[in-house]
Amino acid sequence: MAHFSQDPQILHRPATLKRVLTSFFLAFLFMLLPWSGTYLLLRPDVLLLLLLYWSVHEPRLLGGWSAFTLGLLADAADSSVLGIHALGYSLSYALALQYRHRILSFYRLDQALHVLPLILLSQAVTAGVMFFLKTPQPHWIWWLQTPLTTLLWTLLPFWLDRQTTAPADPPRAA
Amino acid sequence: MSLRPPELFSRGPAPLARLFFYCALALACIVVDAHYHQLELFRKALNVLLTPFQTLADSPGQALQALGKAWDSQSDLQAENQRLRQQLLEQAPQMQRLQSLQADLHNLNQLLQIRQQQFPAGIIAPITGVARNPFTQKIILGIGANKGLESGSPVLSQEGLVGQVTTVNLFSSEVSLITNKNVVVPLLLARTGLRTLAFGNGEQGTLSLPYVPVGTDIRAGDVLVTSGIDGLYPEGLSVATVLSVQRDPVSAFAQIRCQPDSAVFKHREVLVLNRVQSLNPEHADWEQPDTASAPHSRAVRKGRKP
């Protein structure tokens, strides 16, 4: 699928399912590293970041079920109440899908400003559910996860974009 | 005239309908898991699925640790050995005194016909990490149902009570620390014999005793041990030390903050004890101290030799 996210002159090849799955696999390993203390509070939610990235760039490869399943896996991995991440991811994914054309029409930094509320929504859902479950909230620096994850939106996809950019066609022999 | 193009291809339910479906499913999961605790089997299945990923993610850290161990110089090891020997020697008189005290206690209990609680056996478990969730105070152990761990077992460190095993997976288990908000420990104030309850605050390093009347004799520095009346923790385990006591004349209860004794984040291993007694009310034989039959029945329940 061709789109013009970064430079209108560059055509993008569609990402293969293998590439999408590999990126999710790496993101999962990143989430499962032995985080603790302040690092845990600041751990960027790369799973959500990739989910948003692929839902904006390759909406046909993922469905609502993938957001839900990823959320459940994240809940099990973080030993939190099952369904919290699933709820946040499902909401963010649906909104990203709704506004994908708008997001794609901007350059990377402006895109990040659109992605920030989506990531914040997922985090706010977590905080809200934990509030209703009467669990004390973590230290305020936990909220820095959202800007950090958004910052990654401006950096991480360069690699992903490069992988999906079509090489210049060699001149054909007449 | 509508400007919407005709839908040529069926694309399933509308995006909004799908969103509602997944949100409802997620909310149902949250309620069933948090309120009814009925998703434990599902969680275990997900954890089994995640085990290979977890092993892979843990491997760099473990490799670094192994490398660090290999670099430990001989002199370091000798110094540690020397220190441990000294510690052992220093503790020897206390141990010997403990044995005679235990014998005395046993005799007294027999005279008074009180059933003595047997101290349960335990298994040493490696700590593999902290639960990656800033909302809970939990640690992860590297053994689970594969080594016969049970949910509800008390967990100890060298200094005192760490917490309680709350989730047992196939190859790992989760321990809720006593500082976790959902954990309550029945306590005995060692100096005065006052019985009370300690509640976790949900933050690292503090406990509170909310139900101690203002007029109670309690002060900073008092030592709190498990009372053993819940049938979950064996009695006499060191739990916490009182940090501060605030007596507000408006409130009927004093505000007491305590510091847990177990420095759990200092250690690589903890001791998981077998469960002392079944929580099943029909086994709770506190009312009739029957010295002849009770220890036997307990041993049978635990599947151990009396």
Image (tube, coloured by chain):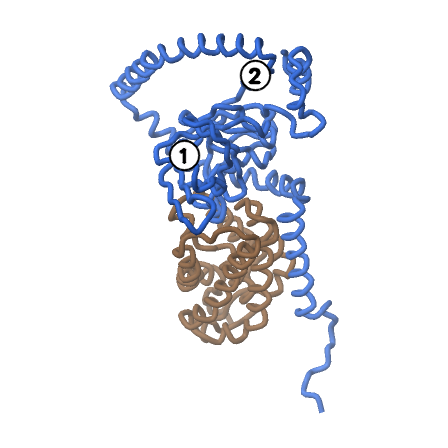
Chain colours: A brown, B blue
The three-letter code of the residue at mark 1 reads Asp
Count up the numbered dots. Answer: 2
Residue at (53%, 29%) from the top-left corner? B154
- In the figure, residue B217 lies in which quadrant? top left
Q: 10 Å neighbourhood of mark 2: few (<14), some, or many (≥20)? A: few
- The correct choice, above or below, for A118 with respect to B37 in the image is below
Residue at (54%, 26%) from the top-left corner? B228
Report the Cα–Cα distance between label 1 and label 2: 31 Å
User: Are discs 1 and 2 located on one and the same chain?
Assistant: yes
Local secondary structure at mark 2: loop
Residue B266 located left or right of residue B200: left
- Residue matched to label 2: B118
- Pick whichever, A3 or B282, lies toward us: B282
Query: Which chain contains the residue that carries disc 2?
Result: B
- Residue matched to label 1: B217
Query: Residue B273 placed where, x, y %?
Result: 54, 24
The disc, 1 or 2, on the residue closer to the chain's N-terminal end is: 2
